[in-house]
Image (cartoon, rainbow, N blue to C red):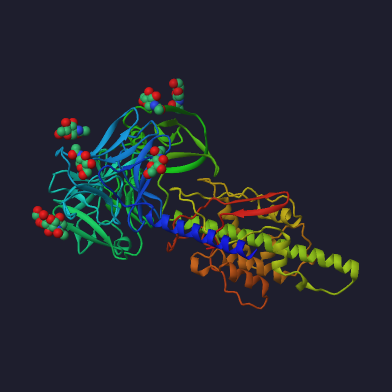
Amino acid sequence: MVEDKVLNFFLVFSLLWLWANAKVELPSDSLKPGDVLNISDKLCSASGNYCMQFDVTDVTYLQIIQTSGSWVIWTANRDQPSLNYSGVLTLDYSGTLKITRQHEEPITLYNSTQGTNISSIATLFDSGNFVLQELYPNGSVKSTLWQSFDYPTDTLVPGMRLGVNGRTGQSWLLVSYESDESPASGAFTLEWEPTSAQLIIRRRGQIYWASGILKNNKFECISEQVQDMYEYNVDNDSFSYTPQNGEYVQYWALYDSGKLADSQKNEIASADQCYGYNTDAGCQTWNIPSCRHDGQTFNTLKGEIKGQYNTTVVPLDTSLRTMSDCEAACWNNCDCVGIYSFSANRIGCISIHGDWEFTSSDDGESFRMIMPKPSEHNGRKKKILVGAVVATILFILCVGIIWLIQKIRKEKRRTMETGRNLRVFSYASVMKATNGFSLDNKLGEGGFGSVYKGKLQMSIEVAIKRLSSFGVLILEIVSNQRNNRFGSLVRHAWELWRDGMGLKLLDPAINVDSFVQDQVLRCIHVALLCLEELAFDRPNMSEILSMLTNENAILSLPQNPAIDIGGRDNVEENETPAIRYTDTRNGLTISNMSAR
Ligand SMILES: *[C@@H]1O[C@H](CO)[C@@H](O)[C@H](O)[C@H]1NC(C)=O
Ligand SMILES: *[C@@H]1O[C@H](CO)[C@@H](O)[C@H](O)[C@H]1NC(C)=O
Ligand SMILES: *[C@@H]1O[C@H](CO)[C@@H](O)[C@H](O)[C@H]1NC(C)=O
Ligand SMILES: *[C@@H]1O[C@H](CO)[C@@H](O)[C@H](O)[C@H]1NC(C)=O
Ligand SMILES: *[C@@H]1O[C@H](CO)[C@@H](O)[C@H](O)[C@H]1NC(C)=O
Ligand SMILES: *[C@@H]1O[C@H](CO)[C@@H](O)[C@H](O)[C@H]1NC(C)=O
Ligand SMILES: *[C@@H]1O[C@H](CO)[C@@H](O)[C@H](O)[C@H]1NC(C)=O
């Protein structure tokens, strides 16, 4: 027995030892002459920040990936994918670096002209640069023959440059992907313009955006907040940046929409918001048809399109097949009202003409429709809408709870003739009883460009009635551009409360004697606080809970609910206005809630 254990111990130990040693030897960061990187191999930089490998999906690309964020910073063959699920990167003795493929021409990354045996090495450095170097016989570096930083894709990492390569005269620029799914060269480019010392974004040659002059390490037209994070380096007609806070791996990416953003999703340039008529934030102007004017933008709508419209298919096999090409074509055609893509990888599109209506749904198809520009207040309204929904739900919940408490109390009275004992049913226990009023504070994550106003499909009164009978409750905020019935409901509630008639908000079917008026008024009061115009005046969820459970807590007085009033805009971005609140037989769920 004892011997067995010792044996086991040694077995485990040796396995561990083998594993540890194998691990040390595993991915190397360089190729020597004669080495190959095959389709299932990986070449990683010394620190492991970056790895080079083949991406084999429908087609095969050789890519360098930033490992922590799984972001592809470089693609060797973006416009020459391997169709045959094959690819081997080789470095031969003459110093030629190429990708060989079955049944397809090899792709030469570096063609050595020496033809003879030279000593070379291809290394993936911790900067993300894959460099082919010629070595002296003693092993020290003689020269750099080729580097991936000279052939940027759509991503700029620190140390990479934009501008003109003084040595070869070739220019360094970013070219966006065709679509999220396809790394092929797309429509937008980011260049450094040395004579005017500006960054420029073009779409098929047309200048859409310019950074403005660089002065004191700041570009005129890029938000200060973003720029505080970077230090720019301009020398020999080239541009590069260094993150001020160099702890994490950083990159700038030019998206297929024309947006330039960093790895933290900070927008550096929004060329996707340039329409030819506007000059805000670096947008440039160009000739557009007179039917397109200030006030119109493309908006993403999800759902179903209806109405008397016709469609035209923009064929896939044209060179102008990205979504931005479709949008530009639509923008230049006065009959066109919007577009959508027919393919999963968002290449190729259908343009829409004529009258249209829209039914929104979160899981619907995605459309890009030309619509009047959202007004200045929409961002704020969106937030208010979310606040209003929270308030309404709370309000309904609160009234429902009181009703329930009263009902149970009455029943208790009837059965036991005991006194009132309201505290038996805490807010929390009723929350639990309602099984899934998951009012978590989670912020929505959507990022549609457009802003929706809400439509409440049911009056508050009906909702209360439904809730109080614990039947089916459907409170759905439908994205709808015109209807603002919800806003007027809220205003009406506020006015009633202000005029001391808050109790009128209750369903007339609820017996006035069956509840404690102060409690109901307190609920309404809290709900109205949730509708305050400024976010920091609104209570958060824990404050709301304390207000509702602690009857002695002093409440501030609600001001005007911010439905139609102008004011300071302190909206967090990326809030999802679409809120779905449905009941299936056995419970209620609320998703995408935002308390403030
Ligand atoms: C790739 O190379 C590794 C060794 O480097 C080998 O074990 C593996 O079988 C090769 N795979 C293919 C598909 O050739
Ligand atoms: C590779 O592609 C060619 C044509 O592109 C085709 O004829 C051949 O059968 C393919 N081979 C494999 C192994 O898929
Ligand atoms: C590589 O260079 C040789 C000699 O200069 C030339 O014949 C060959 O066509 C080149 N190959 C490629 C793929 O450029
Ligand atoms: C180049 O050098 C390697 C090793 O030094 C040797 O194996 C190979 O045969 C040489 N090739 C030529 C073409 O000289
Ligand atoms: C290696 O050789 C080259 C040229 O022969 C020389 O310039 C260099 O200093 C040498 N490096 C080392 C580390 O010996
Ligand atoms: C700029 O060019 C000069 C002369 O061509 C060169 O000596 C210098 O190293 C270059 N600087 C950079 C950062 O490339
Ligand atoms: C749609 O196409 C039909 C047939 O080409 C045409 O008669 C009609 O006017 C078009 N409708 C719109 C809204 O463009």
The residue that appears at 53% across and 56% down in the rendered structure is 385
Q: Is residue 387 visible?
A: yes
Find residue 124 and report its horizontal and vertical position in percent: 29, 51
Badge count: 0
Q: In this rendered view, identify the residue nearer to me: 518 or 311.
A: 311
Vertical side of 399 occupied by 553: above or below: below
Q: In this rendered view, identify the residue nearer to me: 572 or 74.
A: 74
* 383 to the left or right of 34: right
Quarter in which the N terminus is drawn: bottom right
Ligand 3: image quarter: top left
Q: In this rendered view, identify the residue nearer to me: 25 or 368.
A: 25
Find residue 425 and report its horizontal and vertical position in percent: 75, 69
The residue that appears at 74% across and 51% down in the rendered structure is 471
Find residue 590 and report its horizontal and vertical position in percent: 62, 54
Q: In this rendered view, identify the residue nearer to me: 326 or 136.
A: 136
Q: Residue furthest front?
A: 3
Answer with the quarter of the image where residue 58 lies.
Answer: top left
Q: Is residue 180 visible?
A: no
* 79 to the left or right of 515: left
Answer with the quarter of the image where residue 232 lies.
Answer: bottom left
Vertical side of 367 occupied by 516: above or below: below
Find residue 558 and report its horizontal and vertical position in percent: 56, 69
